[in-house]
Image: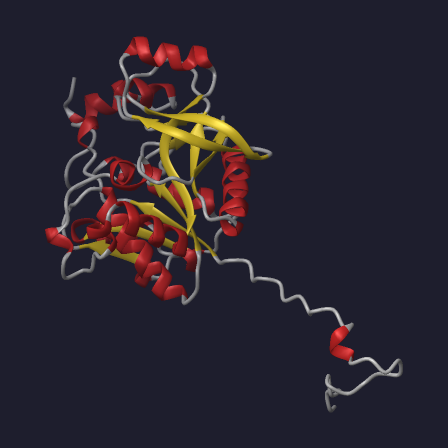
Amino acid sequence: MTAPDSSAPDSSGEHASAIAPTPHTPHPTPQRTALILAGGAGTRLRPLSSDDNPKQFLRIFDGVSLLEKTVARVGPLVSPESIFISTNDQYAAKCTAFLPDLPKGNILTEPARRNTAPAIALCCFAIEAMTGGDPVIAVLASDHYIANEAEFVRVLDRAYQFASKSDYLVAIGIEPTEPNTGYGYLQLGDAIEPGITAVERFTEKPSRERAAGFLAAGNYAWNASMFVWRASVFRRALAAAAPEIAAVTRETYESMPSISIDYALMEKAPRVAAIVGDFGWSDVGSFEQLEKAGVPVKELLAKAGGR
C-alpha cells in the first residue's frame, strides 16, 4: 500500500501535514533484571558460617539457603534469564550448584574483593551489555531474611515501575521498629508521587540517642542497601559521583578502591528516591536475629561445636 504524500493538499486546500497530529511512539518498558550480591564472607555468624560456606549458602531455613530464598522471592517479577549473581571465583561453582535454573553466564565473578561499589558497577555494566538495552536493575543482598514475601514483591514491583520511567536512583527503605544502631538511616523529604519520597540524607549507624531521635521525628527509614535503577541512570550518576569507579573494567578492577555503594554513590547523588516497606526484614547478622527468624541457633551451634 502506497503512503499518501503529506505535501499534497487535502480537499480543503490545506496541506495535510498542517493539520495531522504527530504520531505518538510509546517508549518501550525497560527489561526488568535483578542483581543479587553473593560474594560476602559472612564473618559475623562463625562458627555456623565459614569462609568456604558463608551465610548466604547456609541451608538453615527449613533446608533452604538465603541465596535460594532471595532468587525465589524475585521470581514473580523477573524471569531466571534476567537474574544475575555477583560473586567471586571462590563461590562461583557454589552459586551454579545452588541455582541450576539460572544460565551459567549469569553468574558474574569479580576479579578481587573490593566491596560493593566496584562489584555493582562492573556487574551493572555487564548486564547492560548482555541485555543490549537500558534495563532496570534491582540490586539485592543474597543474605537477608524477609518474613512477608508478598509485601516485599509489592514494594519491589512499585520500585521497578518508578525507576523504569524516572531518572532517580531508588532505595528501598524499611519502616523502623526500634532505634537500632547497627543500620544506616534514610532521611525522607517531600513526596515525589504517591508512595515515593525524596531522600534528603543518608546517615550511617548512628548512636542510640540519635537513632531514637530519628524514630521520634517520624521521617526516617532503615537503609537496607536495596536499590533499583535504570542502567543509564546509574551510569550517569556514578560518573558524576565516583568517576574512577565508573571507568571500572575487569582489567582495572584490582586497582579500584574498596568502598561501599552507599559511600561512593548514594550519599552523593542528588536524585535519590525511596519507597518504604514493612515486610519483616532483617540482615540476620547476629545469632539473636537468626533466632527471631525461626532458626534453631542453639541446636546448630552445638552441632558446629560452637557456644
Figure colour scheme: secondary structure
- Residue found at the very far front of the displayed protein: 13
Identify whether 104 is placed above or below 36.
Answer: below
Residue drawn at x 15%, y 46% is 113
- Residue found at the very far left of the displayed protein: 255
Residue 117 image position (x, y, % from top left): 25, 45
Position of 116 compared to 211: left or right? left
**Residue 55 falls in image quadrant:** top left
Residue 53 image position (x, y, % from top left): 20, 40
Identify whether 43 is placed above or below 26.
Answer: above
Residue 88 image position (x, y, % from top left): 19, 51
* Tally of marks: 0
| Residue in the foreground of this view, choosing between 22 and 207 | 22
Residue 74 image position (x, y, % from top left): 46, 45
- Residue found at the very far right of the displayed protein: 11
Identify whether 194 is placed above or below 290.
Answer: below
- Location of the N terminus (image quadrant): bottom right
Position of 57 compared to 35: left or right? left
Residue drawn at x 36%, y 65% is 130
| Residue in the foreground of this view, choosing between 173 and 247 | 247
Position of 187 compared to 195: left or right? left
- Residue found at the very far bottom of the displayed protein: 2
Residue drawn at x 82%, y 80% is 14
| Residue in the foreground of this view, choosing between 132 and 295 | 132
